[in-house]
Image: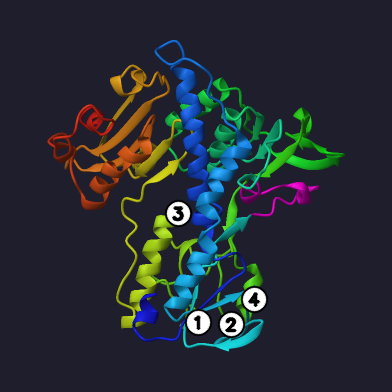
Amino acid sequence: MRCRKAGWSVAVVDDEPFGGTCSLRGCDPKKVLVGAAELADWHRRMAGAGIAGDARIDWPALMRFKRTFTDPVPAKTEAAFKEAGIDTLHGTATFVGEDRLVVGRELQAKHFVIASGAEPRPLDIPGEEHLKTSTDFLALEHLPERILFVGAGYIAFELAHIARRAGANVVMLGRGKALAGFDQDLVQRLIAHTRELGVDVRLNAPATAIEARGGSYRVHAGAEAARVLIETDLVVHAGGRIPKTRRLRLERANVKTTERAAIDVNEYLQSVSNGRVYAAGDAALPSGSLPLTPVASHEALVVASNLLRGNHEKPDYRGIPSVVFSVPPLARVGLTESEARAQQLPVRIKCENTGSWFSNRRLREQTGMFKTIVDDGTGRVLGAHLLGPHAEEVINIFALAVRHGLTATDLGHMIYSYPTSASDVVYML
């Protein structure tokens, strides 16, 4: 939009419906389902404490509600592009030269911005074609009785918590450490909580093969000495994602990529090998970036500025919060304890279970924990890790502190509205 407003001729190409992953196949529809899971779980926890009756998830009705958010997006997005004078093209773009690509017809341009997102990484196991994606899960008209998630990352925990709250029997197969980017003390508490819900979490038990058996599947998992067979009705790929760049034929445009298929960019998000090309979001993933929608949006603004004014702006990756929308959620920002120790920083660590705190007790949620990392010399907040109700909101306060170099004293002297989960911050430092 910025380039078009500046008078440039602009075209947008997408091989999916217009609107992007977050609005159609990711953040937004997922959070609608998470909201229902939270409500059902809160009702269950409050049974006998003033709440009576039954609250359960009606999956088909929930899907209809979800579609009220997603269905209007493609048409509205494309209409907005056209109103702004932007050409919209449907299909897979394929480069045929450094300044040309084909999508139904050949297009020549002075600049290209690649923001093609990510796709499930190949698992290279027999029967991989039977795997469904998170996109498929978010479009299920009916929830199967048995669901197996291959992987133990964001997607697995989030969708497993939704499915279990909706009544499915759920198995999660991890290859090793779960949620490796998060503080492992909190991750272990989340794993324990997930198992308490009835999810069969198996770590160090990677899926090795998938067999179709009529209307169900048999999944082979584990090492040779401890091989197991698991019967399930649906197998969902939750084993990680890679940049969706393979079909672009980037080699024809002299665009170099990394081992993970991300576009190799400089500090201005410009291709190191073809200056006409810029990249943002999951297609780039430069050092310090995270595969998150707000990061992609930030990078898009940087790219637009550099296109219009020449390379002058660099992305700022300080203090990026990240959340696993389990119930309750797990959130992090800044350094983990292990990262701080590896850098031999003089830090003070505070870690405590919060199940007995008022914020948890009033919701009857016993799962809660935090860990904060503060520079022992300057008092600056270096990292924060939260597990519990409203962690996805409170983490933004810590993100502000990390990004702008605020100290524990700065946060401690804030006057917070009370009683709120945010007011607990003063007790975490």
- Check disc 1 and report its element: helix, strand or loop: loop
Q: CA distance from mark 3 to mark 2?
A: 27 Å
Q: Are marks 4 and 3 in contact (CB under 8 Å)?
A: no
> Which residue is label 1 attached to?
274
Q: CA distance from mark 4 to mark 3?
A: 25 Å
> Which residue is label 2 attached to?
253
Is residue 94 shown left or right of residue 394? right
N-term mark: 3 or 2: 2
Q: Closer to the camera, 12 or 290?
A: 12
Quadrant location of the C terminus in the rendered image: top left
N-term mark: 1 or 2: 2
Q: Closer to the camera, 45 or 305?
A: 45
> Which residue is label 4 attached to?
249
Q: Closer to the camera, 316 or 234?
A: 234
Crowd band around label 1 with a 10 angstrom C-alpha radius: few (<14), some (14–19), many (20+): some
Assess whether residue 254 is covered by the magenta stretch.
no
Q: Is residue 338 visible?
A: yes
> Which residue is label 3 attached to?
292
Assess whether residue 131 is covered by the magenta stretch.
yes
Dividing the picture into quadrants, the one containing residue 74 is bottom right
Q: What type of secondary structure mainly makes up the magenta span?
A: loop
- Residue 67: x and y in percent read 56, 49
Q: CA distance from mark 1 to mark 2?
A: 7 Å
User: Where residue 64 is drawn, which disc sits there?
Assistant: none
Instruction: Inspect the image, locate mark 4, and give the three-letter code of the amino acid beneath it.
Output: Arg
- Residue 59: x and y in percent read 61, 36
Please give the range of residues in magenta: 121-136
